[in-house]
Image (tube, rainbow, N blue to C red):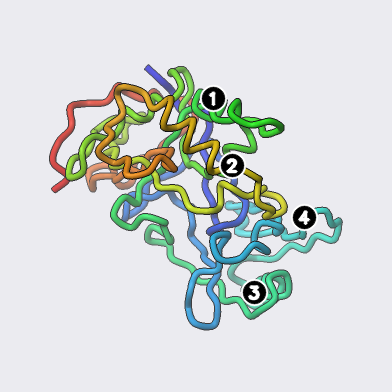
């Protein structure tokens, strides 16, 4: 049986994560404070690392209890702290200056702004997977791989790629438990361009995706459902949380059960 080794939320979508000891599951199945805020351009489109390299160079430190954010640019010493709500205009001004055009900071307390609205639960990966993937590259350690992949739940005490047990064929889910919460594994996360970039600078890492795809194809475990693999740039598991577990908490140290038999996603 595995356990929750570490737990992360991303209070402002696309900016730095916050390590937490526990997090409550909110209405849509996401974690409280995870992607609660999102940066928008003047057309209401997301401003994120996929679209805007400048986002990678923004450093943030968020105090969820105080609802404050400290912002600075990578490599610079000038840091400014703001209240996320009382000083929203100032936060938007700082972000706009850093990115180069006006930014609106939108807030949603009812589940935030997940990447996958159909599988909006916590994303799951194992510590062993982070270590194994880091070994595919020179000069990239497991911590940097974690920052590139941006998971919520990192599971310890299990073998690399154990999380690939947590999905089956499309149209099904794989139930499992984290502490008192029931989660449904849905699919292996399809990666965007963000993991191919240095998380501090936004610079592309030469050959990152090609190496990843080759090694993932060659080392995909026998328990992984290949039905999802139209390509191999997939890693980490997207989940859905049934309503019966809304309001439960996930905490570091919680036991993670073995997967249960798959059921229909409906």
SS for callout 1 = helix
Mark 3, Cα crowd under 10 Å, few <14 / some 14-19 / many 20+, is some
Residue at label 3? 92
- Asked whether the residues under the numbered discs 2 and 1 touch, taking CB atoms below 8 Å apart as contact, a structural biologist would say no
Residue farthest toward the right in the current orientation of the protein: 77
SS for callout 4 = loop
Q: Which mark is residue 208?
A: 2
Q: Position of residue 25 (x, y in %)?
A: 37, 46
Residue at label 4? 74
Q: Which residue is drawn at 35% across and 47% down?
A: 121
- The disc, 2 or 3, on the residue closer to the chain's N-terminal end is 3
Q: Residue at x 54, y 55 (%)?
A: 11
- Asked whether the residues under the numbered discs 4 and 2 touch, taking CB atoms below 8 Å apart as contact, a structural biologist would say no
- Asked whether the residues under the numbered discs 2 and 3 touch, taking CB atoms below 8 Å apart as contact, a structural biologist would say no
Eye-nearest disc, 2 or 1: 2
Give the side of residue 26 with respect to residue 74, left or right: left
Spatial CA distance of label 2 from label 1 is 14 Å
Eye-nearest disc, 2 or 3: 2
SS for callout 3 = helix
Eye-nearest disc, 4 or 3: 4
- The disc, 4 or 3, on the residue closer to the chain's N-terminal end is 4
Eye-nearest disc, 1 or 3: 1
Spatial CA distance of label 4 from label 3 is 18 Å
Q: Residue at x 55, y 77 (%)?
A: 41
Residue 167 sits in which quadrant? top left
Residue at label 1? 132
Q: Position of residue 114 (x, y in %)?
A: 41, 57
């Amino acid at each position: 049986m595995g356990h929750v080794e570490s737990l992360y939320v991303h209070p402002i979508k696309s900016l730095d994560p916050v390590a937490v000891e526990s997090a409550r599951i909110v209405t849509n199945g996401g974690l409280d404070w995870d992607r609660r805020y999102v940066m928008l351009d003047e057309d209401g489109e997301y401003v994120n690392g996929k679209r805007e390299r400048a986002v990678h160079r923004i450093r943030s430190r968020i105090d969820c209890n105080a609802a404050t954010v400290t912002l600075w640019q990578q490599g610079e010493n000038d840091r400014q702290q703001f209240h996320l709500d009382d000083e929203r205009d100032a936060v938007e001004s700082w972000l706009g200056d850093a990115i180069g055009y006006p930014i609106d900071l939108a807030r949603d307390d009812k589940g935030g702004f997940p990447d996958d609205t159909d599988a909006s639960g916590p994303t799951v990966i194992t510590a062993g997977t982070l270590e194994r993937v880091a070994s595919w590259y020179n000069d990239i350690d497991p911590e940097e791989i974690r920052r590139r992949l941006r998971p919520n739940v990192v599971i310890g005490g299990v073998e690399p790629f154990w999380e690939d047990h947590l999905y089956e064929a499309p149209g099904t889910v794989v139930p499992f438990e984290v502490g008192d919460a029931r989660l449904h594994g849905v699919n292996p996360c399809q990666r965007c361009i963000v993991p191919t970039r240095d998380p501090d600078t936004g610079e592309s890492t030469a050959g990152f995706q090609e190496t990843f795809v080759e090694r993932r194809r060659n080392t995909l475990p026998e328990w992984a459902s290949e039905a999802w693999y139209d390509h191999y740039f997939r890693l980490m598991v997207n989940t859905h949380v049934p309503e019966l577990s809304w309001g439960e908490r996930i905490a570091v140290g919680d036991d993670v059960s073995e997967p249960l038999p798959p059921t229909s996603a409906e």
